[in-house]
Image: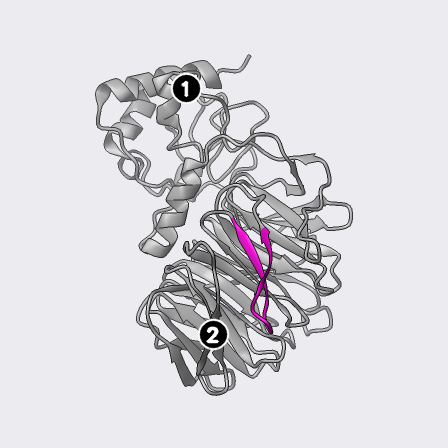
Amino acid sequence: MPKTSSMIHRLPLVAAAMMITIGVAEAQLVGHGGMVKGVAVSGDGGTVASAGFDYSVMVWDLKAAKAVARLRGHEAAVNGVVFTAAGGPVGERIVSGGDDGRVLLWRLDGAEPERVMTGHKGRVAAVAVSPDGQVAASAAWDRTLRLWDLATGAQVAELTGHAGNVNAVAFTPDGGRIVSAGEDGTIRVWDRRDGAEIKLIGGGMPLTTLGVTPDGGSVIAGGAEGRVRVWDLATGAERPELENAEPVPVLAVAVAPDGLTVAAAGVNGVVTLWSLGEGPVLHTLAGQRGPVWGLAFTPDGGRLLTAGGDGAIRIWDTTTGGEIRTGAPAVAMASAGDGGERGARLFRRCDACHTITADGGNKAGPTLHGVFGRRIGTVPGYPYSDALRNGDLVWTPETVSDLFKRGPDVVTPGTKMPVQTIGNDEEREELIRWLEKVTAPH
């Protein structure tokens, strides 16, 4: 899994990695090779975009509950997606941001990104688009926010002031201000015209997510301490927080289009819906397995989409709190049971990124099915780095052992694979014996 430098993100990732075996369930939108990091719904409610740990953005027909496109252009996990307005200068598009520090603009059916916007020196944790569709904002772990002209792809502003990673960003409904939240525990409000910071709100534990109410009056945020807090955007005064029965780190919040309902999700996979005006809990949704990273209401507010660690996007009825089932099978996160074998148990640290079966496909890393005897960088459809795509190394028990002994950064320089070693000779041998058995074509 990609390395991170923040406790906020590392804790949920560790929890997700522990969710190894998922049984068959009636999930909705299933197709990503691993965790789903973000989800968005188009303005007409008919299309969904999702951001995957498998480096891809997927486009879905919501009514048919099926994938219509897979967009590949990021070179690392994708963390955030958002739609542009259909009536804006670039038309209806998708903007995504990822661990590769890039912001991409996509046609909904595009094979290649229309715009590649670079400049960040750290992972892009979140993206937002102005209501007029002219400007995208990105929040990144280089402690900056950047504004991008979507018509040209040019950077129009760099906003600095956060004293740590910036984890969330949103525009106010009038499009005149940008609101951000970060690891420094603050919410900052910026003027879109000149990028000037005009307000500092909050303080305390790191914040991971935020949402702005449709009337522009309030900002709602959550973070590491498990609280869902509400501030008045005009005065900066904190309002009564939304009581969370189980204060676990909050990973996502969303506000319904009518401004009456707030949803928040955490590392424990539970999503809570509140009545914003009155404060009581309306529903507790607990069908997602693993952390929930993304939330999105449909434009009519009648549905809530949740995306997370089990690789599935689920759809909920916000009136009843019930899951709307399509009968599509959920994808098991593990490629095989351990059968009591030590090699299988050792593979669990790799399972989040690799499959081992003929029909497993690529996830964040290429499939390992048939890996022994295969030249490096040759799995069809996987977006390898140039260093691996042009390599001549052949995977054998000896070269795989060397990879885990000395580390992928030494054996395969330029790789995107996280640095992970196994120093114990016996453990390496058991893992390789098991891999030889389960990845061999039959």
Screen quadrant of the C terminus = top right
Q: Is residue 120 left or right of residue 41?
A: left
Residue sitting nearer the eye, 374 or 251: 251
- The disc labelled 2 sits on which kind of residue? Pro
Q: Nearer the viewer, residue 339 or 237?
A: 237
- Can the viewer see residue 78? yes
Choose mark 1 or mark 2, whichever is in front: 2
Q: Position of residue 2 (x, y in %)?
A: 38, 46
Please report the residue visible at 34 percent of the width from the left and 47 percent of the height from the top: 3
Task: Inspect this view and state whether residue 106 appears.
Answer: no
For the residues bearing labels 1 and 2, Cβ distance under 8 angstroms: no
Is-magenta flag for residue 273? yes
Q: Check the picture and name the quadrant holding the N terminus.
A: top left
Q: Position of residue 315 (x, y in %)?
A: 67, 49
Q: Is residue 68 left or right of residue 311?
A: right
Q: Name which residue type carries label 1.
A: Leu
Earlier sequence position, callout 1 versus callout 2: 2
Query: Which residue is at 59% across, 34% downward?
Result: 331
Mark 1 → mark 2, Cα distance in angstroms: 54 Å
Viewer-proximal residue among 389 and 53:
53
Between residue 250 and residue 399, name the one nearer to us. 250
Q: Is residue 228 magenta?
A: no
What crowding class fits label 2: few (fewer than 14 Cα within 10 Å), some (14-19), or many (20 or more)?
Answer: few
Badge 1: residue crowd in 10 Å (few <14, some 14–19, many ≥20): many
Say how the picture is coloured: one colour
Determine whether 389 is above or below 242 in the image.
above
Which type of secondary structure does the marked residue at label 2 adopt? strand
The residue that mark 1 highlights is: 435
Percent across and percent down for residue 389 are 45, 37
Q: Report which residue position mark 2 lands on.
A: 240
Q: Which residues are magenta?
A: 270-284
